[in-house]
Image (cartoon, helix red, strand yellow):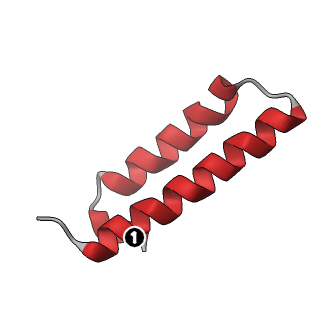
């Protein structure tokens, strides 16, 4: 059940999330402050279905 568009969507999300975490850590926020909302958004996107990512 491996879909190229899902993988591309996840990769795009991973890059965006990583960039956001790096930027916010540069500002001085602890990673937990960044990761909790990101995780919530990520799981809300995953659970309804993989196609929400696009």
Which residue appears farthest toward the right when viewing the image?
Answer: 27
Residue 8 x/y as whole percent: 39, 70
Q: Mark 1 = which residue?
A: 8
Q: Residues within 10 Å of mark 1 (few under 14, many from 20)?
A: few
Which residue appears farthest toward the left when viewing the image?
Answer: 1
* In front of the other: 25 or 38: 25
Query: Relative to residue 1, is residue 45 drawn left or right?
Result: right
Of helix, strand and loop, which one carries label 1? helix
* 5 lies above or below 46: below
* Residue drawn at the location 31% of the way across and 68% of the way down: 6
Q: Quadrant of the N terminus?
A: bottom left
Residue 21 x/y as whole percent: 68, 41
Residue 7, image quadrant: bottom left
How many badges with numbers are in the image? Answer: 1
* 33 lies above or below 52: above
* Residue drawn at the location 43% of the way across and 74% of the way down: 54
Query: Relative to residue 47, is residue 26 drawn left or right?
Result: right
* Residue drawn at the location 79% of the way across and 45% of the way down: 23
Residue 39 x/y as whole percent: 49, 39
* 1 lies above or below 40: below
Residue 37 x/y as whole percent: 59, 38
* In front of the other: 46 or 27: 27
């Amino acid at each position: 059940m491996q879909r190229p568009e899902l993988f591309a969507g996840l990769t795009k999300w991973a890059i965006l999330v990583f960039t956001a975490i790096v930027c916010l850590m540069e500002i001085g926020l602890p990673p937990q402050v960044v990761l909790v909302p990101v995780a919530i958004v990520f799981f809300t996107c995953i659970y309804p279905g993989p196609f929400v990512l696009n």
